[in-house]
Structures are given as C-alpha cells and as structure tokens.
Image (tube, helix red, strand yellow):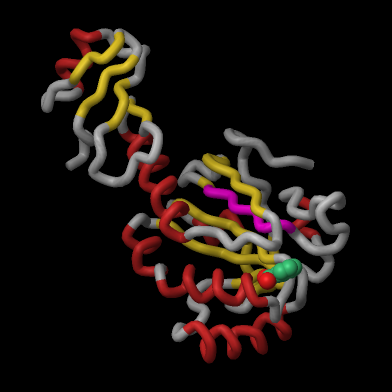
Amino acid sequence: MAVHLGDVAPDFTAETTEGTIHFHEYLGDSWGILFSHPKDFTPVCTTELGAFSKAKAEFDKRNTKLIGLSVDDVASHKAWAGDIGETQGTALNFPLIGDEDRKVAELYDMVHPNANDTLTVRSVFIIGPDKKVKLTLTYPASTGRSVPEILRVLDSLQLTAEYQVSTPVNWEEGGDVVISPAIPDDEAKERFPKGFTTLKPYLRMTPQPNR
Ligand code: BEZ
C-alpha cells in the first residue's frame, strides 16, 4: 500500500546491521529518514551510503536519524560495509535493514514492478517527531540521490513546522521565505518583526524568522 504525506509511518521490527530495531522506538523523538537501496554490492548505492555516512554530523545537528534498507540480508550488508569503507573513505555509520523477505519494502511500497519486479526503487521517506510522513521522494535505480537536496528539504520541513511560512523555489537555509496567505497583515507584523515585502497580497516575503 502506498504511504502518503500525513500518514503515520508504518511501524515494523527488522534486523539491521546494528541489531534488531523497532522502527518507532528507534526514531524516539527525532526526525527520521528511511531510504531504500535496490541491492547490495552495486555502484550507485555504494556511493550513496558513503555520502550519507560522511554527512551524518549534519543529520545529527538536525536531530534526524538515518536508516537505510536493501533487499539483501544483514550478513551481506556487513560484507558490503567493508567495501563502502574501502572505497568511500568512511565507515557506514547508521543501520541498514536486511529486508530479504521484502517485508518493509512492501509496507512502504518500495518495489515498483514496472521498474523492476524484485529490487526496490530509491525511496526516501522523511518522518517527523510525530511519526507522520512529511516528505516522499522516488528515484530510479540509475539515479543517485543528492545529500545536499535532502538536507535542504529537511531544513525547509523543520522551519515550516515551527513557523507559518513556506519556502519558495530553490530556497536554501538563510534565504527569504513566504508568509502563509492565511495570516492577515496585522498579525504578520507581529509574527515577523523583521518586516515583510508585499509583492502581491498572497505573496509576502520575509527574512527567515529563526536567524
Ligand atoms: C546501483 O546502485 O548502481 C544500481 C543498483 C541496482 C540497479 C542498477 C544500479
């Protein structure tokens, strides 16, 4: 079954490279990123796991736990982790789920049969501290994900969860944001003391409020 924005992220228990994990318990009060890899010992996945491991401090700063998944077993993942360390210059430093029975992949609709009927696509689920799904992304096996883009959307999700703003096209941390059209001007003046520019009544820009 597809997992949609706003749904409670399905809970599961799985074997991982860091032992048995109960997903919701693992997340605790943190944000979480669950992301799938089509298969062990494949080139793009190897680079992705290296890049996410290198960026772990950035995810920690954002109170966000990573957990990967591939449809091979944990013994295979552990052997593959050696290659990741050898070729990517970093150890794998977050758990990787052994999903050889595709239990979690099916729970999160990560196998798209018209793309490949056995391997997962590259899914990303960002989950908030309330355990609800805040963002989903789907890439084909042939296209590696972008860690800076995932950090960027995480920044946007965390900012917009706290303030009544949205982030415009190509927004990055520190850029101006859009005030929610639901807030009348009088209230906007109080909520956004740095001021705002009205381009249209529905398009009011203000400096990022938490900076
Ligand atoms: C890769 O990670 O390079 C990959 C995995 C599965 C299919 C194609 C490419």
Q: Quadrant of ligand 1?
A: bottom right
User: Which quadrant of the view contains residue 75?
Assistant: bottom right
The one of 95 and 72 positioned closer to us in this rendering: 72
Give left or right: position of 89 versus 143: left
Of residue 147 and residue 184, the one placed in the foreground of this image is 147
At a point 49% along the width and 41% down the height, the residue shown is 130
Vertical order, 22 against 158 (above or below): below
Residue 151 position in % (x across, y down)? 41, 54
**Whole-percent x and y of residue 147?**
46, 60
What's the magenta region? 121-126
Residue at the spot 60% in from the left edge and 76% down from the top edge: 46
In the image, is residue 69 above or below residue 18?
A: above
Q: Quadrant of residue 59?
A: bottom left
Q: Is residue 197 magenta?
A: no
**Image quarter of residue 161:** top left
Q: Look at the magenta stretch and give its main secondary structure.
A: strand
Residue 77: percent from left, percent from top = 67, 80
Q: Is residue 49 left or right of residue 179?
A: right
In the visual, does 138 lie left or right of 55?
Answer: right
Give the farthest residue toward the left.
194
Q: Name the residue located 40 percent from the left edge and 68 percent from the top edge.
A: 55
